[in-house]
Amino acid sequence: MTEIVPTGWTYASAPESREIVRIADRYGHFVGGEWLEAAETYETIAPRDEEVLAAVGQGTQADVDRAVAAARGAYADGWSSLPGSERAKYLFRIARLLQERSREFAVLESLNGGKPIKESRDVDLPLAAAHFFYYAGWADKLEYAFPNRRPKAIGVAGQIIPWNFPLLMLAWKIAPAIACGNTVVLKPAETTPLTALLFCDVLRQAELPAGVVNIVTGDGRTGAAIVEHEDVDKIAFTGSTEVGKAIQRELAGSGKKLTLELGGKAANIVFDDAALDQAVEGIVNGIYFNQGHVCCAGSRLFVQESVYEPLVAKLKRRLATLRVGDPLDKNTDVGAINSAAQLEKIRELVASGEEEGAEIYQPPCTLPEQGYWFAPTVFTNVAQSYRIAQEEIFGPVLSVLTFRTPDEAVEKANNTPYGLSAGVWTEKGSRILWMAQRLRAGVVWANTYNRFDPTSPFGGYKESGFGREGGRHGLEPYLDFEESEAFGG
Ligand code: NDP
């Protein structure tokens, strides 16, 4: 086995200034184009050092009622009947404003969520803007997207998003909804509300008509109030499978439309003919990107037995070079864990891995004393039955397993209640296609991982949810269709 060589030198810090962002002491809810004073608030913090950043509204039933009424009013009062080409202009404006203000948003995203600035700067922000650009392009072409089906808006969409990609998930939800002529009530996650609140300023700059987008902050109770609201026509949810199931039960028989984007336990599969150095980069990106707080993270690595030893040695060497630390430092590869609760969950699952008999490896790295931190972790000697091979850890923790034949790889990869994503590493094109046909996963990446594009639909099978976001497919959940035989529908 190749020896693990610790790096003999360190990087000088390169902090991004937070001066570009102005955070208010207290925020209310954004309803009908105005700030509604919040009766109750809670504190939102920076996970890197637990600094209190602001007091944020804890949305009540009355706040949700007002937001839904504002959304309904805007829907009836012109937004749904506005020509698509006019709606598109607002989406284009929002996209351009996000680009112009991207540094400000990136700093705030890293501060409130803990992700490295180079990720919020180079991934979250460009992709969020790209989603608005992309769906702006569809707004006046819905008839062409669904020929002979007479697409029309649904009404008021309730949208509930998680904390791992706060602004990007907001863009995934709001862009297709308003492009199709719907209005929106969105709740950001309790721990990461600040970029959604800054986004309200972009809406004001873009002069989006009042009430088209309403943002109500708060915890799960606020989310539940949106789900249960009688005047909401559609729910779009991204988050845990547990809450997704509860929402589906709640909505059963209500006639409301529903899309769920839930958890995952993706298989990243490396064959013996793969370019191993390239695969190592993909594995690292697959599981340590955004501290592993990624629903499609490649958290189960399947390695063909003949290359197991060299691959694991290369992986451990690479891990020793990852820089863990301040999310606002431009050198940082792995930032802070999003919350104390998430850190606790990761610790608990990692402890279970050790107890069940897996072998743990963590590179030497000094973690800051304050804030929420977890070292990049690799488990070898993992059996399929272990909790770390079955449950979503949602942290920087990789479980390595092995296989001998392609059939075995498929069988093991599909042995999970989830089905969101997978990765395949091989030089052989025919094998990529063979695998992609058999893996029960919404996305299969070949010789790459965690690649996103607004034109490409994303979503799951089984307990990873249903419905697709992105691409032309992402329009469909926000439309009703008047199917007509005369039109061949
Ligand atoms: P949740 O599913 O609880 O949170 C997702 C969103 O739903 C948040 O806005 C949350 O509010 C809201 N919510 C919570 N309860 C309800 C409810 N009853 N009705 C409506 N909305 C509700 O995820 P957690 O943040 O608790 O994370 C738990 C685990 O879920 C993670 O460890 C991870 O494994 C998984 N997860 C998966 C994600 C994915 O992208 N697939 C994203 C996030 C988490 P609030 O923030 O206040 O809780």
Image (tube, rainbow, N blue to C red):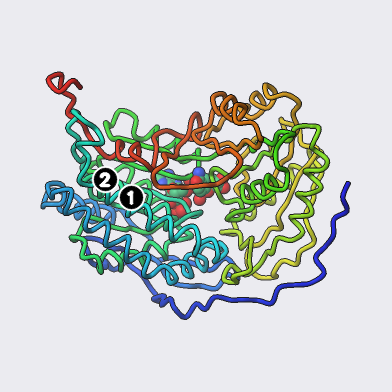
Q: Residue at x 76, y 36 (%)?
A: 382
* Circle 2: element type: helix
**Can the viewer see residue 348?**
no
**Can the viewer see residue 200?**
yes
Picture coordinates of residue 273, whole percent (x, y): 72, 34
Residue hosting label 2: 138
Q: Is residue 279 above or below residue 344?
A: above
The residue at label 1 has a CB less than 8 Å from ligand 1: no
Of the 4 image quadrants, the one containing the C terminus is: top left
Q: Residue at x 28, y 46 (%)?
A: 177
Is residue 273 or residue 102 the one in the foreground? 273
Looking at the rendered structure, which numbered label has been put on residue 134?
Answer: 1
Q: Amino acid at mark 2?
A: Trp
Residue 469 horizontal side relative to residue 286, left or right: left
Picture coordinates of residue 270, whole percent (x, y): 69, 36
Is residue 306 or residue 474 the one in the foreground? 306
The answer for how far apart the CA atoms under marks 1 and 2 are is: 7 Å
Residue 301 horizontal side relative to residue 132, left or right: right
Which quadrant holds residue 465? Answer: top left
Q: Residue at x 71, y 30 (%)?
A: 385
Residue 24 horizontal side relative to residue 326, left or right: left
* Circle 1: element type: helix
The residue sitting at the bottom extreme is: 19
Q: Amino acid at mark 1?
A: Tyr
Picture coordinates of residue 339, whole percent (x, y): 57, 59
